[in-house]
Amino acid sequence: MVQERPVRVERRLSAILAADVAGYSRLMHNDEEATHSKVTALLTDAVAPAIAEHGGRIVKNTGDGFLAEFPSAVGAVRAAVQFQSRISELATGDMQDRRIAFRVGINIGDVIVEPHDIFGDGVNIAARLESIAEPGGICISSSAYDYVRGKVRVEFADLGEQNLKNIPGPVRAYAAVQANRNAILGPCSTPPLSIVLLPFKNISDDPAQEYFVDGVTESLTTDLSRIVGSFVIGRNTAFTYKGKPLDLKQLGRELNVRYVLQGSVQRGGDQLRINVQLVAAETGAQLWADRFDKPIANLFEVQDEIVSRLANQLEAQITEAEARRSERSPNPSSMELYFQGRSLFNRGWTPEYLTQARGSFERALALDRANIDALVGLALVDLVFGSSYMADDRAPFLARAELALIKVLSLAPNHAFAHGVFGALLITTKRAAQGLAECERALALDRNLAEAHAQMGIAKYTLGRGAETEAHVNEALRLSPRDVFAPRWFLYIGFAKLQLNEDTEALGWMLRSVEANRNYPIAHFFSPPH
């Protein structure tokens, strides 16, 4: 019997370019026929000629974008720069809310080839890189960057390790930036929540402390990249500015970022002082400054604590700055509306602020149904309404929050904050053991989530283990001592103390909850008048 040969699968190493139209659903909703006509014209007049000129082929169109293959990474980048520049020129004069802009991702990978399609992890990574590119921008993987470095007239900013949706491990990414003030790589809008962390200065007398200073800079760069929506310039690029006199406004233009964080470290005896300031790159104005004074016991423990606290405080400060900035925009983007919602939520748990936050999250989703963070925001608002007894019937709020979170985690299983919110919901709905596991998962993904630590304390109280509650809440306070959620954390320590028959201590924590935020209503039910 003659054995049939296995069907041969054709594979080859290719440069894959994935592109789509930013805000396509919104554009189609506003004017379906005009949008379709414009996209078709741009593909014909700008995209296809550039791809052909640089040796590529369009594998397939995807309605709101396309997939292309090149034999060379250099060819792929040059084609992308060419058609992005041409699209930008053609869009001159268009209203901002009707402007067509493509996002581009480029990767090198071994692909399975079929006549009208290509498959493989290399294709998936290109598509995910496209999703984190700015409208009009180009984002490439480190594998592509290794091929094009020094061979194209484009500068790239190192974005560091990126956790891409449904890609098992982190991918180092690079974003094309302006090589000079006359270069055009598409719309030159600065990415929201974009920041460069400059190497901290060692102003101690001891040069040996340099390693500690650099360690703080590196760790904080990594932790900032976990912030939702952040665009953080990679450490390799940031360290090229070490020890150089800088014009921060010029630096912002060079790296195309909105914020610059700089700081200094000084050691004297057994004390360590760290000064930090956050600067708006566009104006050079200082937005926030703080100082950390810590006794030195174990340098690595001190570094870990300082980095965690800084990351939490910076997230709150930059989110607020982005919200203020977006309020001045006549046509805020989906992410800008998300930042507005988070800012409103952080102002206090009152029906007024929560309703306004819900409206911002809903508008964000109307512009971009794929805005996972806005969906988490909606779930968070519903959870607070349901858990804080702000409605006669809590069940619909809690059920709606749970459905939203299940959807989020099916789409983004490594979304740390969503795991933390889901943990809180499970604890609220009398599933404390499952909630505890969700919080542990959240912390495995992002060690800086103070709320997840506090929720673990609440879960322990709910499970009758109130003796363990205070330690978890103290860890949350160590990470985020001025947290908006702190009044609730204090209250639950009070509950735990009551569970342990430590009534005097319980009273102290409940009064502390009231003093921390007099607009937190539940605390007033349990604290006596004073």
Image: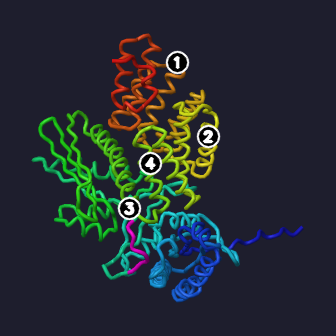
Q: What residue type is labelled 4?
A: Arg
- Residue at 35%, 61% in the rendered image: 233
| Location of mark 3 (residue) | 328
| Location of mark 4 (residue) | 342
Query: N-terminal of the two: label 2 or label 3?
Result: 3
In the rendered image, which quarter is residue 175 located in?
A: bottom left
In the image, which is nearer the foreground, mark 2 or mark 3?
3
**Mark 4–mark 1 distance (CA, rounded to whole Å):** 33 Å
Secondary structure under the numbered disc 2 in the rendered image: helix
**Mark 4–mark 3 distance (CA, rounded to whole Å):** 17 Å
| Location of mark 2 (residue) | 402
| Location of mark 1 (residue) | 464
The local crowd at label 2, few if under 14, some if 14 to 19, many if 20 or more residues have their Cα within 10 Å, is: many
Secondary structure under the numbered disc 3 in the rendered image: loop
Magenta segment: 184-190
**Mark 3–mark 1 distance (CA, rounded to whole Å):** 49 Å
Residue 409 drawn at (x, y percent): 59, 47
Query: N-terminal of the two: label 4 or label 1?
Result: 4
Query: N-terminal of the two: label 1 or label 2?
Result: 2
**Mark 2–mark 3 distance (CA, rounded to whole Å):** 34 Å
- Residue at 40%, 33% in the rendered image: 519
Report the number of numbered marks: 4
Residue 154 higher or lower than 248, as above or below = below
Query: N-terminal of the two: label 2 or label 4?
Result: 4
Secondary structure under the numbered disc 1 in the rendered image: loop
In the image, which is nearer the foreground, mark 1 or mark 2?
2
- Residue at 16%, 48% in the rendered image: 208
Q: Which amino acid does label 3 sit on?
A: Arg
In the image, which is nearer the foreground, mark 3 or mark 1?
3
- Quarter of the figure with the N terminus: bottom right
